[in-house]
Image (cartoon, rainbow, N blue to C red):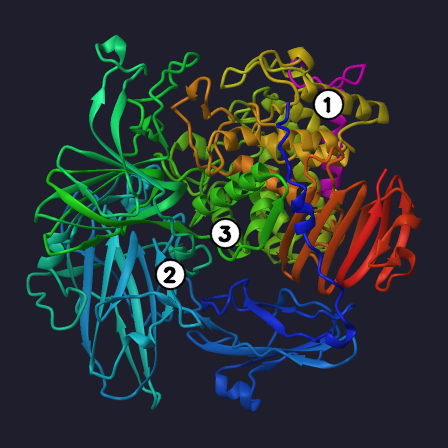
Amino acid sequence: MYTNHSFNSSLISNLSFPTPINVKSAQLGPITKLTVEYMDNPIGIDTKHPRFSWKMVSNIQGAKQSAYELIIADNERNLKQGKYIWRSGKISSSQSVNVTYTGDKELKPSTRYYWKVKVWNQDNKVLESKEKAYFETGLMSTDGKTNWEGAQWITSNHASTDSANVTLFRTERKLSNKPIERAQLYITSLGIYDAFINGKEVKLLKEDKKTVDETFNPGWTDYHSYVNYQAYDVTHYLSNKGSVTLGAMVGKGWFGGRIGEIGQYNKITENKLALLAKMVITYKDGSKDIIVTNDSTWKSSEKSPILTNDFYDGETYDANIEEEIKGWNNGKYDDSQWSNVSSLTYDGKVKGSRAAAARIAEEYTQYPIKAFKYRRIEQSSQNGGKSTYDFGHAVTTTLNPKSHISLKAGETLIMDMGQNMAGVPNIKLNGIKGSTVTIRYAEMLNDGRKNPTLTTGGSDGPKDTLYRKALTTAAQTDKYILSGKGVEEYQPRFTFHGYRYMEITADKDININSIEGKVITSVKDQTGTIKTSNEDVNKLFNNVLWGQRSNYLSIPTDSPQRAERVGWTGDVQLFAQTALYNYNDFSFLENYSEIMDTYNRNNNGAYGSIMPNAFVSSFAKSVASGWGDSGIIIPWVLYQQTGDTTIIEKNFAQMDKYMDYVGENGYDTELFGDWLAFQPTSTVFLNTVYRAYDAQLMANMAKAIGHEDAVEKYEKLYTKTKTDFINKYFDEEGNLLTASADNFTESRHGYPGADNAQTGLLWALKLGLYETEQQKEKMISNLTKNIENKNGTIRPDQPENTLAVGFLGVNVILPTLSDVGHHDVAYTLLLQDEMPSWLYSVKNGATTIWERWNSYSLEDSFGDSSMNSFNHYSYGAIAEWMYKYMAGISHDPKNPGFQHFVLQPTIDSEHRISWLDSSYDSVYGRIKSKWKVQNRTFKYQATIPANTTATVILPAKSLKEVKEGKVPLTKAKGIKVIEFKDGKVICEVISGTYNFESKLN
């Protein structure tokens, strides 16, 4: 049963709808949000034909763009003075997204271009962008040589059969004593780097003078094929003192650490870390000084305060060595004990990109909410103690987490950060020189119990100690050795952890002054918001956001804590649409699409289950339905959200090769399937389903780019696949043989297969894989009966009104239920809080999305420890339904990109949710959808941004009882009523803010 949450009626009255805008106060509004390649003022763009976008903001009803002119100059002064390198001329078009540079002049390398746009509105009035907008090209090459001015890959001379831990590089250079105009740094590494100029760490400077602390650059790619480089404006790091010191610290990262062993990346350079860099200082007289990495002017050292570093295992930092080498990255440092460097050959490409750069996201910093310490463990009664817990319990003393904490040797301190996250702590502490502080991390605390149903489950220790069994081989441990010089600050540099809880111990007494949790993520600006009358649903949505923040880190990963953290492609594809509603992550997923494209080219047209290669090689090489298909699905989702066909055009040939590869070789028949489903569907069945789905998407994408031969090819493939499906999987009564037709008896996780399994029914309905309406209605009936599960007759030992899907059903279950008219069932599943359900984890205190429906249970303790992440994002795909159906904000399938879109809010007929307030910052502007239901009256406020239109579909008892403001809908301005049908009013609406009201049955 769903939880009947109590509701305060005052919340309805507090959900206010603003009054309509007075015509006298209406404003034309600015042209704003200027982006290039979906990024704000990007530096290091290597594309020859960048894409420009902007937004028109206006509260005038019907505001739209009738024409535009795009103007580009090679410096800010020329832009103001009208000296342009290109102007598009006045183009009669409403397009303001993905307008491509088509100038005759090739963009020059290492050049900052300034741009603006003029827009003619609906009244032919000219609006001009005012914000400072620019983009800077990179080196415009990929061979690692062209425009690098002779820069060499350099590495340490140190001979070792083991991977280097950390390598420090430095060079000092005299400069011309002339005023500096600007300075640029281009840098990459095999490993991960932090760069320094004159002792200061290089950070990305934004236009508002704020800095972004990027970390783990150059990011994760298939290093056998290519590595990314980053570009920085470093002018503000220099003075006219006549010299500059450039330093870099390179750690293992994905390249040299355990995470990359399957990919065998470290064999590329015989276990050595390497650096490639070029710095250009341009003086006001036009002359330049250029500093490049080479084997003649650079030195290296492996004496580093970071004694060990690994993403899985953590970092050991000795502050005493930091004191010994203090000033190594600044001028006048005595590097006579440092070694000369060696040059090496790297055969991969070097491409400019920071689209997926990870950063220390200060806006998400967490602070501890609880703290306690203990010295003694009370043993369980069966082990001679007095504890009632199976594994005993820690005898704890509660502390104030916000005060200074004294920790004595032999004591254990537990800090609860209140939020599961990916990141590192920032800790300020003091103690005796040489004291070693050990910090271990976990997502959960033990409850001290065994799992009565699983030998692999349950706690791994006493109550209130860290639960770490599910980390597999990841140590997730940092160590800090104090220098004894007052209050010291430690923040790990070359590792990250998935955690909520920290355990701190020390071999000598220490004092802890403060602890913060620094979040590391690659997500960009948040674009979607949802609030409802149900606090559990609100918490679920927040957990979805945190799951994405934690796992969008250079690539989309599966978890941030255990010895895995890799790009499982099934997770990526099923969550992709949710991801693009939540955050402006177009460039992030485009970056990942390039990784997939590279994999495809290197593997005869296949897309793998893990990309880039890592973790388990047999998994990485397998082509599994729902996983390999990410190479088709990600470009499709990007196209739907942006209307941009660039990624389709770029990847279509490789997608076509994948389809041929699967046609010739088939999918793997053993792996994955509907992963972790409580009632699994045959993997062979799902292979057929995804073949049909891919064929549909390929036909539609071929239409979008005018590839008529491919349209015919894939329409035929869909038709054939559908026919084969119908002949094989339907019996005479219309039942779907999702198990018996394939002799599928049990999943890899021990759940029995069954005909009419939920995921199988959902996909057949979604894709139209049926011949008659009788078959369709039979499937709908079987689906709703399966979900209802009255008295456990269909799914024994599982509750009534529950889902039973896994990874390949979770993103289709609620949308499909709504599409076939069962919104009530969809809401029941959303609000269910028995296992399996989304709110079960919320009820159990989750702050992120769990990997398993039963990762933890109040009844049975922890689930299967071999795979038990409490910070995944896959099941967070429910947010797609929340945006598209609850809020009703959906792209128009016939017009991708949200210039025309659909607003169709779906209310809960049982009023368990009585109001919703949501928004989505589409590529054309902010869409708002806000509704409430009270006394059979539906009130709805919608904002359609300037330069867009929408089809609005509202529930209503009759057309005559629908109003906009105080005016009957048929007489309202900006609205054209199309029809009233089946209790819904359908109308076309121009831009503006509207207040609708209707009476409900």
* Type of secondary structure dominating the magenta stretch: helix
Which amino acid is tagged 1? Answer: Thr
Residue 905 vs residue 667, the one in the foreground: 905
Give the x, y percent position of residue 233: 37, 72
Identify which residue is drawn at 29% across, 88% down. 179
Whether residue 416 is situated above or below residue 154 in the rendered picture: above
Give the x, y percent position of residue 944: 73, 60
Residue receiving disc 3? 594
Residue 50 visible, this orientation: no
Q: Earlier in the sequence, mark 2 or mark 1?
A: 2
Which segment is the magenta one?
Answer: 713-740
* C-alpha separation, residue under disc 2 versus residue under disc 1: 52 Å
Give the x, y percent position of residue 223: 37, 49
Residue 334 vs residue 869, the one in the foreground: 869
Give the x, y percent position of residue 6: 63, 33
Residue receiving disc 1? 784
Disc number lying in front (3 or 1)? 1
